[in-house]
Image (cartoon, helix red, strand yellow):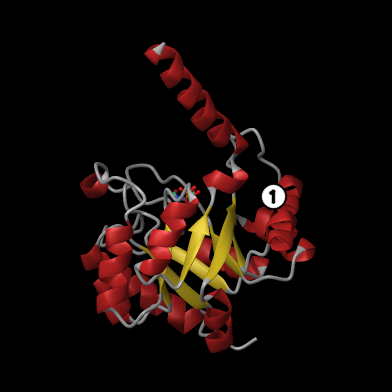
Amino acid sequence: MDNYKLIEELRGGLVVSCQALADEPLHSSFIMSKMALAAKRGGAVGIRANGFEDITAIRQEVELPVIGIVKKDYPDSPIYITATMKEVQEVVEAGAEIVAIDGTNRVRPNGQLLEEFYVDIRNTYPNVLIMADISTFEEGKKASELGVDLIATTLCGYTDYTKNVALPNTELVKSLSDQLPTPVMAEGGYWTLEDVEQAMMAGAHGCIIGSAITRPMEITKRFVGKIAELKLME
Ligand SMILES: CC(=O)N[C@H](C=O)[C@@H](O)[C@H](O)[C@H](O)COP(=O)(O)O
């Protein structure tokens, strides 16, 4: 599929993020591949996944566009989503069509700035689509000016300077969608049908949901929390 068609496939659709890190109960490529299958049967238009093994297993199970990332903690660096070319290579070799990278203005663990990293990716993998995971409007604007193919609001709430922002941030989706030519995926903290409605009304190209669909421990906590709140009111 050509890249223009691929971006169109995501329009008005739901991408399901199928991720469970090593410390999570469902950590398993097999389980993630079945989560992806369930998402596909439910009507998802794409999958977001982490790491070579999960992306490969998902690729074998479903024929949907995959947004690949590699989460890795580097000492002394706050950047953990696809931080260097090594992680990009892993995503591309696993077969993802889209690589999502940290799209903030923070310095990468290898000292690179976003613009240098972006040029390296384009030069090395000219056919791979680049999604910038950003946390603020300014970061989205810069990523758009660089020429990324897609912007996602993934990191809003997860950088030092946005950690107090309430999620989901549909206002950020609106300002990005209104002012930039680059398609914007609403991502981060989408839990209800109303949240999704607001994001789509705000002009989102599509919505990416993880925890509310694929993290049963978080889903359980949410219900348990509600019951605990009700008990306090008795
Ligand atoms: C901040 C960060 O590391 N986000 C990660 C990015 O891939 C995932 O852990 C999230 O699940 C994903 O962004 C979807 O968001 P939510 O799970 O809130 O629907």
Q: Name above or below for residue 209 compared with residue 182.
A: above
Local crowd size for mark 1, using a 10 Å CA cut-off: few (<14), some (14–19), many (≥20):
many
Q: Nearer the viewer, residue 169 or 5?
A: 169
User: Percent from the top left, x then y, of residue 62?
Assistant: 75, 65
Say which quadrant the N terminus sits in: bottom right
> Residue pushed farthest top?
234
In screen coordinates, is 56 left or right of 7?
A: right
Whether residue 40 appears in this view of the structure is yes
User: Percent from the top left, x then y, of residue 164?
Assistant: 24, 41
Establish whether ligand 1 lies closer than 8 Å to the Cβ of label 1: no
> In which quadrant of the rendered view does residue 149 lie?
bottom left
Q: Report the label total.
A: 1
Whether residue 56 appears in this view of the structure is no
Q: Nearer the viewer, residue 205 or 55?
A: 205
Point 64% across, 58% down: residue: 52
The local secondary structure at tag 1 comes to helix
> In which quadrant of the rendered view does residue 166 lie?
top left
User: Percent from the top left, x then y, of residue 162?
Assistant: 24, 48
> What residue sits right under mark 1 in the picture?
32
Point 44% across, 73% down: residue: 205
Q: Name above or below for residue 196 compared with residue 10.
A: above
Point 41% across, 11% down: residue: 234
Q: Nearer the viewer, residue 145 or 222?
A: 222
User: Percent from the top left, x then y, of residue 184?
Assistant: 39, 71
Q: Amino acid at mark 1?
A: Met
Q: Nearer the viewer, residue 108 or 54?
A: 54
Point 27% across, 76% down: residue: 178
